[in-house]
Image (cartoon, grey):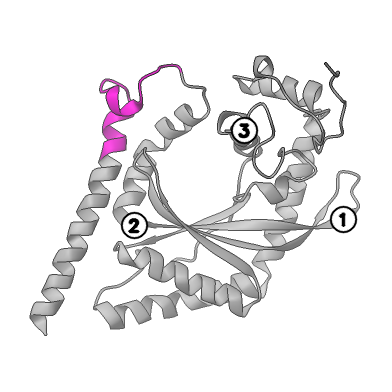
Amino acid sequence: MPGRTPTNEKGEDRRATAMDKPETLADYTKWLETERGVTISEQRRTHYEAATLSAKAELEESPLWMNLLSSLGEFNDGYLIKTSYPMLISSAPPILLIKPYGSFFAKTFRKNVLLNENWPDAPTGGWIVPSNWLSRINDVLRTSLVVKYLDAVKILADNILLLASQQRVEGRLDLEASDEGYYAGHVYLTRPFEVPRLDWDTEKVAISVEVQITTQLQDVIRKLTHRYYEERRGKTASSSLRWQWEFESVEFIPNYLGHILHFLEGMIMEVRERNGRMAK
């Protein structure tokens, strides 16, 4: 049986083993060093923070971001004319946020290990390591928009994608619907950013900006359930039962509230459309 072949941090030509599968972030940090040759140090954190701050500043000065901010009122007015209802909950401009390093690193753990259906081989697309992780994690820069009604999620997303295409920025939409009762539209806008390298030279890196679009009701339930969601997704399964059968678990009620509210929003849309037909 051939021995394992050492590799660089990109992780080519190397397999993990089932015995090596990390179960905690501490295990994962050790696994990265021994199996992938990647040392997670304070320097990694500092570089991530410098690179994301640079990308955020570049985006905020870009035509894409400025046009998005100036177009939100137009999108809202177009929806109001069409439906007689406002689209957006607030006229305040969205705030651009950076994913904290701790959350970012935990997401690489989930992608590389917990959600990796190919284990002990690399996940689809290869291992997510420092040489590529700014491009592989799709929400290092993120913002959110809250709309009043369910149909406005896709309408607003389509408007943003059209705006991005006019700026020659790559965009895509994921309409999320999870078992845990999470419903939202995620628009991903990907463009190159000039960011510092670890040696403080600079390089062009394609980074995705996530625009989360959710309804008012889903925004409320998301804030209530976020803690449970974060706790569960950062762990390996401790029970053979799915959460839907663990009726005494802390997430059973809030997760089902997410599904119930989504159903209610569909019913609200039906009543709204029915009233509109009767008024004609």
Residue type at the position of mark 2: Thr
Residue closest to the far left? 278
Instruction: Say few, some or many: other residues with alpha carbon within 10 Å of mark 1 (under 14 / 14 to 19 / 20 or more).
Output: few
Compute the Cα span from label 3 to label 2: 35 Å
Looking at this view, is 47 or 31 the one in front? Answer: 31
Q: Is residue 86 magenta?
A: no
Check the image and report above or below for 62 versus 214.
Answer: below
Q: Which residues are magenta?
A: 238-256
Instruction: Say few, some or many: other residues with alpha carbon within 10 Å of mark 2 (under 14 / 14 to 19 / 20 or more).
Output: many
Judged by depth in the image, the label closer to the viewer, 3 or 2, is 3
Q: Look at mark 1 in the image and give the residue it sits on.
A: 202
At 40% from the left edge and 53% from the top edge, which residue is drawn?
Answer: 184
Compute the Cα span from label 3 to label 1: 34 Å
**Residue 271, horizontal then vertical, whole percent:** 14, 65
Left or right: 232, with 55 as reference point = left
Mark with earlier residue (3, 2)? 3
Looking at the rendering, which quadrant does residue 104 occupy? Answer: top right
Instruction: Say few, some or many: other residues with alpha carbon within 10 Å of mark 3 (under 14 / 14 to 19 / 20 or more).
Output: few
Q: Look at mark 3 in the image and give the residue it sits on.
A: 118
**Residue 50, horizontal then vertical, whole percent:** 77, 48
Looking at the rendering, which quadrant does residue 1 occupy? Answer: top right
| Helix, strand or loop under label 3 | loop
At 33% from the left edge and 77% from the top edge, which residue is drawn?
Answer: 79
Residue type at the position of mark 3: Asn
| Helix, strand or loop under label 1 | strand
**Residue 52, horizontal then vertical, whole percent:** 71, 51
Q: Look at mark 2 in the image and give the residue it sits on.
A: 215
Mark with earlier residue (3, 1)? 3
**Residue 105, horizontal then vertical, whole percent:** 66, 35
Mark with earlier residue (2, 1)? 1
Compute the Cα span from label 2 to label 1: 39 Å
Residue 56 is marked as none
